[in-house]
Amino acid sequence: MAWQTENLPFNAFGASLKRTFGGRIQRVSIDAGFTCPNVDGAMTKGGCNFCDNRSFSPSRRVRLKRVSEQLASGIAAVTERYKKVAGFIAYFQPATNTYAPVEQLEELFELSLSIDDRVVGLAVGTRPDCVPDCVLDLLERLAVDKHISLEFGMQTIHQAGLDWMNRAHDHASMINAIDRSRGRGFECCTHIILGIPGETHEMMMQTAEEVGRLGFDSIKLHNLYAVEGTPLGEDVKKGKTELMGREDYIQTVVDFLERIPPETIVERVSGEAPPNYLIAPKWCLEKSSVRLAIEGEFKRRGTRQGSKHVAPKVDPAKRSRPSDSTPEPIRDQIEKRSRLPVLKMQC
Ligand code: SF4
């Protein structure tokens, strides 16, 4: 594989985009005004314990014009900072970005792709229980011409960890979502959190093995970190929850990456949050030094991503596509246009 011939320790995202697009590609984050079924009561209220969802009000509106302004100003800022940028990915990041009537999603995504010739694609963050087939069909259509990445918050395969975070979905919903998403021409990315209280090293490695079994195209690894305005943040301040130390994290990330397939693109190897918003651990503010330490550990061990990967018994591409198990309250919000006026579409 290209990354191996370039002597890299893992299949890094930036290098992979450069090979595909011939230059530096930057993501521009967009808040399109979505809420989340884990906040508005469709599944539960309160949200995940690590997520600052104070702004995810079901009644908030973001005008399409505001979305285009965010994209334009983000592109201008990135161009100013890096000078040589070959293209941009519009990154729908906060909240659950497939949680709106599908016609509205279509309007929003098409607008973002057409606003500037340099926008090469979209990255759309969502939950595993929030991608009914109609949303996947839309992304499949868009992926014919553009780079589309659907980012699933899987976090862990273990129910105890999902419950501890108040995710309000199980791993079965992740399996159903990826089995319906794979092979449609868009990239399937998974977010994983390492250091969930109660999870042993062995449990985290089981999650690593599942990434290969399910055939994700890419992965974002995060350490569990606490920010202001969250239940986790309060627990950490009170000393009720302990977060993983830097050295432990570096060892665990390398162990994890050794177990995932070499073809999986690694989009992120640690969490990040603005310094004045991050409560702990402060070591994750030193993003470049964490990455260097991870690369150094691979070198020390003489291993690479995939060194300990065992190919799954069933090739992920041969897993059959199951029927859609999207929960009814979420399906209602996405398939029935009148029910969720999340996005105000008038300019
Ligand atoms: S599912 Fe995502 S957006 Fe919703 S509360 Fe959890 S982390 Fe936040």
Image (spheres, rainbow, N blue to C red):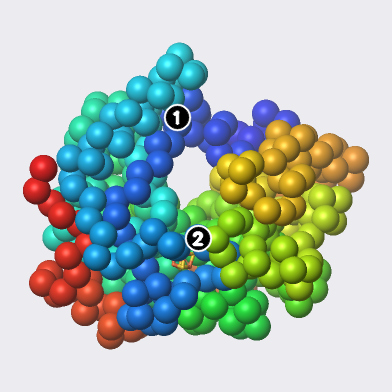
Report the quarter where the N terminus lies.
Answer: top right
Report the quarter where the C terminus lies.
Answer: top left
Q: Does residue 172 lie above or below 35 as drawn?
A: below
| Amino acid type assigned to the residue bearing label 2 in the image | Asp
Using residue 7 as the reference point, say whether residue 40 is left or right of it: left
Residue 175 visible from this viewpoint = no
Q: Position of residue 26 (x, y in %)?
A: 45, 31
Q: Residue furthest top?
A: 83
Sequence-earlier tag: 2 or 1: 1
Q: Position of residue 247 (x, y in %)?
A: 86, 50
**In the figure, residue 229 lies in which quadrant?**
bottom right
Q: Does residue 159 lie above or below 76 as drawn?
A: below
Q: Position of residue 2 (x, y in %)?
A: 60, 34
Q: Residue at x 74, y 52 (%)?
A: 281
Q: Secondary structure at mark 2?
A: loop
Q: Residue at x 72, y 54 (%)?
A: 280
Mark 2 to mark 1: distance in Å? 28 Å
Q: Position of residue 218 (x, y in %)?
A: 53, 52
Count up the numbered dots.
2
Between residue 208 and residue 129, name the one nearer to us: 129
Give the residue at mark 1: 25
**In the figure, residue 343 lies in which quadrant?**
bottom left
Q: Residue furthest front?
A: 238
Q: Does residue 152 lie above or below 129 as drawn?
A: above
Give the residue at mark 2: 52
Using residue 142 as the reference point, say whether residue 281 is left or right of it: right
Between residue 182 and residue 46, name the one nearer to us: 46
| Amino acid type assigned to the residue bearing label 1 in the image | Ile
